Image (cartoon, rainbow, N blue to C red):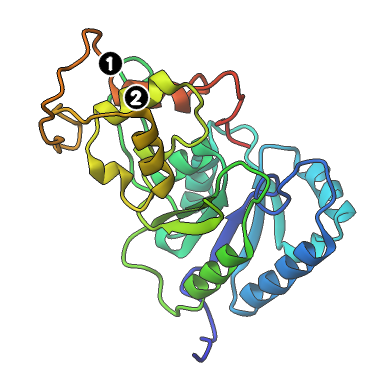
Amino acid sequence: MAMPDTSGIRRVFIELEHVIAPVPGKAIPTQRAANFTKHFAAWKGLGVEILLLSAADAKLKTRIVEGLDMLRCFDQILSWKGHASKGDYIADQSKKNGWIPTEQILIDHSVNAIGSTAGWHFSPGDGARQDTEAVANTFRVPQDKEGLSMEDLAILDDMLSKPDPPSKTFHYYAATFQEKRFLDNSDEDMKCLEFLTNKTLFKAIFASNPSPFLKNRPDLEALKATLGVHEKTLPLSNGVAAEADPTPAPAAKPKAAASVLAEMLAGGGDKGKGKGKGK
């Protein structure tokens, strides 16, 4: 397939920790760094800006990147410090510079970063949905020791090889389950659960949401089976309800899934692990 002169996606926002550098504070393996350098150079050749975006001070992050010998990979090293979220920063810069959401993508591990960019917002009180428009496409990876894989880079190569931007923003999630990499091309708020360890919260979420939330997620399907969760018919904020289940409902009313997710996005969903906050 012939490569276009330019990509329909004009810029890539990407995090360093847990994405490029799977283990923060440790050197990136030589071959991994070489692979990223090669792919980033190809993206730049298509006119794509590559912007390293994190919460850290930009000068400090620049020194870290210099130490990794990857400074040439990025057009700019930016900090979203001073903004409410990474998505808020991207929205602000997009407004100032006339950037179009479908022409940019955020690659990140943070649920908060992805959620604020994709437009998933919840009321801190009752967990009610307060969605806004997405400010960029998103590509999420889990916060694990793998980070962005070589398979993921190939998928991104394909996305960036297209001369036209997508008609609407897309939201992807890539991870490994049972030693196989899978790709979910319909990532959404209720799927951002893999880092939780509290099984009570998992059961509450699975019990109050239908199977469509498990689409393209073999990891969550397996977890649901392990927990022995049965779906119930409950009204959902998007108007979809699960099929009725003959199993008697437990005496204790489960916490609303949206409320659970709201707590999670606020950083309180899994305090034992300390994950989920934006970088």
User: How far apart are the two marked residues, 1 and 2, measured between alpha carbons?
Assistant: 8 Å
Q: What residue is at 52 percent from the left and 40 percent from the top?
A: 113
Near-viewer residue (234 or 245): 245
Residue 78's x, y, as percent? 68, 48
Q: Residue 61 carries which label?
A: none
Residue occupied by mark 2:
203
Near-viewer residue (212 or 134): 212
Kind of element beneath mark 2: helix
Residue furthest out toward the right: 67
Residue occupied by mark 1:
254
Q: What residue type is labelled 1?
A: Pro
Relative to residue 10, is residue 249 drawn left or right?
left
Relative to residue 251, is residue 21 drawn left or right?
right
Kind of element beneath mark 1: loop
Residue 59's x, y, as percent? 81, 44
Residue 223 seen in the figure: yes
Q: In this view, does 22 lie above or below 3?
A: above
Residue 6's x, y, as percent? 53, 81
Q: Residues within 10 Å of mark 1 (few under 14, many from 20)?
A: some
Dot 1 or dot 2: first in sequence order is 2
Q: What residue is at 57 percent from the left and 34 percent from the top?
A: 83
CB within 8 Å, label 1 to label 2: yes
Q: What residue type is labelled 2?
A: Lys
